[in-house]
């Protein structure tokens, strides 16, 4: 069972707010503005949108890249103890 799926990654990449992060909270991944992540959940930040190289480069993100990133971020979430 995946903790981070492609839809979750899509929400991160397509957010209107450029300063958001993917956070694992209460059994699900959610996208939150970085300034709204409290200290209790800061340790469960999986990735900030600003850290996605393709977004910073301004290039199009393919569906394969979304799936690949979801697999990588799923491993990150597991490493964080989700």
Image (cartoon, grey):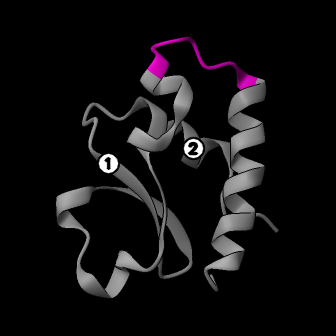
Q: Is residue 38 left or right of residue 80?
A: left
The extreme top residue here reads 59
Q: Residue 46 appears at what percent x and percent y?
A: 52, 63
Q: Which mark is residue 20?
A: 1
Where disc 1 sits, the SS reads strand
Q: Quadrant of the N terminus?
A: bottom right
Q: Which residues are magenta?
A: 57-63
Q: Residues within 10 Å of mark 1 (few under 14, many from 20)?
A: many
Q: Which residue is mark 2?
A: 9
What residue is drawn where x is 32% and y is 48%? 20
Would you identify the image quadrant in which residue 7 lies?
Answer: top right
Q: Quadrant of the C terminus?
A: bottom right
Asked if residue 38 is positioned above or below residue 48 in the image, the reply reads below
**Magenta includes 14?**
no
Asked if residue 39 is positioned above or below residue 62 in the image, the reply reads below
What residue is drawn where x is 57% and y is 43%? 9
Q: CA distance from mark 2 to mark 1?
A: 12 Å
Q: How many marks?
A: 2
Q: Residue 81 appears at what percent x and percent y?
A: 64, 86
Q: Residues within 10 Å of mark 2 (few under 14, many from 20)?
A: many
Q: Which mark is residue 34?
A: none
Q: Is residue 75 left or right of residue 55?
A: right
Mark 2 or 1: in front is 1
Q: Residue 52 appears at what percent x and percent y?
A: 52, 37
Q: Is residue 33 left or right of residue 60?
A: left
Asked if residue 20 is positioned above or below residue 63 in the image, the reply reads below
**Magenta includes 62?**
yes
Asked if residue 19 is positioned above or below residue 82 in the image, the reply reads above
């Amino acid at each position: 069972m995946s903790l981070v799926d492609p839809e979750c990654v899509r929400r991160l990449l397509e957010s209107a707010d450029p300063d958001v992060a993917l956070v694992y909270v209460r059994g699900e991944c959610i996208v939150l503005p970085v300034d709204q992540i409290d200290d209790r959940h800061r340790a469960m930040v999986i990735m900030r949108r600003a850290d996605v190289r393709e977004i910073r480069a301004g290039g199009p993100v393919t569906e394969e890249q979304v799936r690949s990133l979801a697999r990588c971020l799923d491993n990150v979430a597991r490493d964080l103890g989700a």
